Image (cartoon, rainbow, N blue to C red):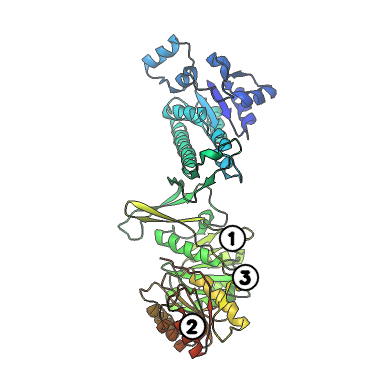
Amino acid sequence: MRALISVSDKTGIVDLAKALHALGVGLISTGGTAKLLAEQGLPVTEVAEVTGFPEMLDGRVKTLHPKVHGGLLARRDTPEHMAALQAHGIETIDLLIVNLYPFEATVAKPGCTLADAIENIDIGGPAMVRSAAKNWKDVGIVTDASQYADVISELKSNGKLSDKLRFALSVAAFNRISQYDGAISNYLSSVNFEAEKLSEDYVPERAQFSGQFNEQYVKVQDLRYGENSHQQAAWYRDLAPAAGSLATGVQLQGKELSYNNIADADAAWECVKSFETTACVIVKHANPCGVAVGANPLEAYSKAFQTDPTSAFGGIIAFNRPVDKAAAEAVSKQFVEVLMAPDFSAEALEVFKSKVNVRLMKIALPAHYGNVRNALETKRVGSGLLLQSADNHELALADLKIVTVKQPTPEELNDLLFAWKVAKFVKSNAIVFCKNGMTMGVGAGQMSRLDSARIASIKAEAAKLSLQHTVVASDAFFPFRDGLDVVVDAGATCVAQPGGSMRDQEVIDAANERGVAMVFTGVRHFRH
């Protein structure tokens, strides 16, 4: 058996080569890899000896040769193939260990030049990978250090690789090539090429959205069904998921997550991550139905639950702090589909042991987790895709523009910032009443902003919550004064809205007439 080793990232390669040598596998290698193995006292044959040609063009041409690709591609069960190898003095290659030039890491560096990007496009590596992966029945193709242990284990046990492992390695190899080519396409089609600036140190300007968009995801699991039982579905994650994102979570107990569970859980998790202090978010059908901050998880949950106990039934609950026994006991009294937190105390886990269907998700939050967000958002449309930068705008106190005679109190300003955070995660049209770090009424997803305001008032009344002296956040401007009048009639004394309507002055005049404070945020938070 012969193995050809040619790697850019040499992590673990010496140990792998030593293990192969101990198993009697002959080693062939290229350039720097061959030098490293030789320095470790391993007998290694350089590719140039195999091909009869030296490495050329600064290493650009070394493995692109029939004695390499013939040895990889020849089918051992086809007499004609084997006869051709014998006629041309080509030996088979049974194992290929390759990882590619670090193109993705190179272009991710600030100030990456076009020349550096182009130089890090691997040619020979992908060509060999494709040859070996195509001929998977006869050749094992290893493209990642995480595969080394399985390869050595099977060789030690069986003297060869199983069909199952070789096929899995082939699939992984083609996946890697797809990812690599997609990254190259994304980069090159984003370059705003300026020939007059071309030089070795030319750093091109790049469009935010590339001419071709290639995105890669890895399947986490198949789902029982989709949004409805007649639909089929699966859950995928990014190749490199962001720390603290839902896709990094671990399910500790409970039934398998459903499509709707995952969608709602993401809405709850992204919302609770936006708070720096201890917070709880309850989501139902992708909308927050209760959000609150508190001195501890129990207080935050108790306040969030009060907003809309009816909708909280069967909801998704998220905490941005570890769940302790007190919070767990309170939550366990209601029907909850999914409970998420950075961690759970041993006592909290014990509380839910008897509730075997409750899905507990542990999602580790990194430091400064509020800044860990998806950079892009996508939405499928007929035969196409909408792509946009994510709505990651964070409103600061200094951003607020007070436009009325009445000035908000410091307490109202704090509640306005709280309400604005919540409104960002409520489907448009969104109206959110808040007081003392707690949602008091939420109106979501209506065609009319008036109806959202009325629904928020109705929900507050049903929950026996008074809207007197509350603040209100509206995700978009009030086009007429009637929406303002509805929230003021309900008891609001301070309103936050983006501004920007042709009738802004009419709405400001109405606020002054009603004796309430109003601030403009300068940004809106449509969420469809």
Q: Amino acid at mark 3?
A: Thr
Decide which of 472, 310 is in the foreground and name it: 472
Spatial CA distance of label 3 from label 2 is: 33 Å
Q: Nearer the viewer, residue 151 or 452?
A: 452
Can residue 234 be seen at all in this image of the molecule? yes
Specify whether 528 is left or right of 32: left
Residue at the extreme left of the image, as rendered: 230
Amino acid type assigned to the residue bearing label 1 in the image:
Asn
Mark 2 residue crowding within 10 angstroms, few (<14) / some (14–19) / many (20+): many
- Does residue 285 lie above or below 403 as drawn? above
Q: Which residue is mark 1?
A: 371
Q: Position of residue 216 (x, y in %)?
A: 46, 46
Q: Nearer the viewer, mark 1 or mark 2?
A: 2
- Please tell me whether mark 1 or mark 3 is closer to you in this view: 1
Q: Is residue 476 left or right of residue 149?
A: left
Q: Position of residue 461 (x, y in %)?
A: 44, 86
The amino acid type of the residue labelled 2 equals Ile
- For this rendering, which residue is in front, 362 or 473? 473
In the depicted structure, whether residue 231 falls above or below residue 337: above
The reply to whether residue 437 is in sight is no
Reading the image, the residue beneath label 3 is 277
Q: Quadrant of residue 349?
A: bottom right
Report how far apart the C-alphas of labels 1 and 2 lie in the structure: 34 Å
Between tags 3 and 2, which lies in front?
2
Marking on residue 508: 2
